[in-house]
Amino acid sequence: MNGFSSIIAEFGHLEGADLLREMIRKSFPGRIALVSSFGAEAAVLAHMVGQIDPETPIITIDTGQLFPETIAYRDELTKTLGLTNVISSGPGEARMATLDPNNDLNVIDPEACCHFRKIEPMEKALQGFQATITGRKRLHSETRASIATLEEADWRLKINPLARWTREDLDNYFVEHNLPRHPMVEQGFLSIGCLPCTSPVQPGEDVRAGRWRGTGKTECGIHWTQNGQPMRGPSPSL
Ligand code: SF4
C-alpha cells in the first residue's frame, strides 16, 4: 500500500471537473498545482481550474526553446480565464549558456537537454506540492494508452482528469466554453513542445507523433512515474 492508496481508491472513478473540485478543494488545498505547457489542449484544464479556484498555482516551464505562439497563447489564456497564479520556471540564461552554449544539445543529447531545460526546473517549481494535475490522455499515444486518472509518482499524487477523454470530448469542451485554440493547431500541430523538437502531425498519426520525430524519444521525462510511464534510458545528471 502506498501513501495515496485510499485517495486513489475513493476518487479514481471521477474525472474532469468533478475530480479536480475534489482534489483542489478537499484533498490537497494549498498543496496542489496544475502543470501546463499551454499547448494544443491546455485551455480545457486551465479553464476548469480557473472555474474552481483561479488562484491555483499553474506551473509552466519556459525551456528557452518555446514557440513564440505558445508564449502568446499562455498570456492570452492567463488573461481571458482570469488565472492569477501562473508560475513560469526555466533553466535560466546562465545555465543555458553553460550547458548548451551552441544551442544544439537537443540534437546531440536530447535526454540531457530535456533534463536541464525541463526536469530540473519542474522539480524546483514543484517543491512543497503534494499533488500535480496534468493533461495527459490515453488518446495521445500507445505509451499513454492505459494511464489512470490518479497515479502515484514518487511521493506525489499525479492527477490526470482528462485521461479517458476522447477527441470529441475535448472539441465539445472548447466549443461549449468558447475557448481560444492555440494558433498552431490549425497548421497540424496537435501536441506542441519545444520549437526544435516539434513537427506537425499527419492524418492517421498519433497526437504526439510530431514530438522528437524520428528519434525514438517519446517523453521528456517530467511525466515519468513509478508505475510505468516510459522514459528512454536513465535520467542523465548534468
Ligand atoms: S524538447 Fe527538445 S529543445 Fe526542448 S528540452 Fe527537450 S530536447 Fe531540449
Image: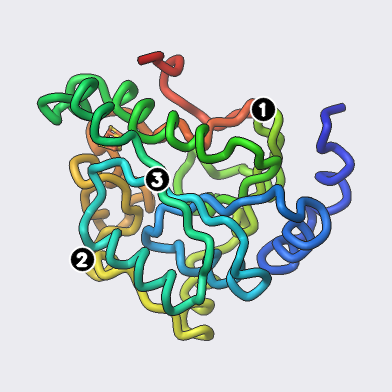
Left/right placement of residue 34 relative to residue 97 reads right
User: Is label 1 in contact with label 2 (beta carbons under 8 Å)?
Assistant: no
Q: Name the residue under label 3.
A: 61
Instruction: Indicate which label's residue lies in the foreground, 3 or 1.
Output: 3
Q: Residue 33: horizontal and vertical position, in percent?
A: 61, 51
Which mark identifies residue 187? 2
**Mark positioned earlier in the residue sequence (3 or 1):** 3
Name above or below for residue 182 compared with residue 140: below
Count of numbered circles on the image: 3
Q: Which of 113 and 126 is in front in this view?
A: 126
Name above or below for residue 30 compared with residue 222: below
Q: Residue at x 67, y 50 (%)?
A: 32
Which mark identifies residue 154? 1
Question: Does the beta carbon of the residue at mark 3 sit less than 8 Å from ligand 1?
Answer: no
Q: Residue 179: horizontal and vertical position, in percent?
A: 44, 79
Picture quadrant of residue 108: top left
- What amino acid is found at the position of numbered circle 3 in the picture? Ile
Mark 1 residue crowding within 10 angstroms, few (<14) / some (14–19) / many (20+): few
Q: What element carries label 3?
A: strand
How far apart, in angstroms, are the residues tagged by discs 2 and 3? 23 Å
Q: Nearer the viewer, residue 72 or 41?
A: 72
Picture quadrant of residue 91: top left
Instruction: Indicate which label's residue lies in the foreground, 1 or 2.
Output: 1
- What amino acid is found at the position of numbered circle 1 in the picture? Asp
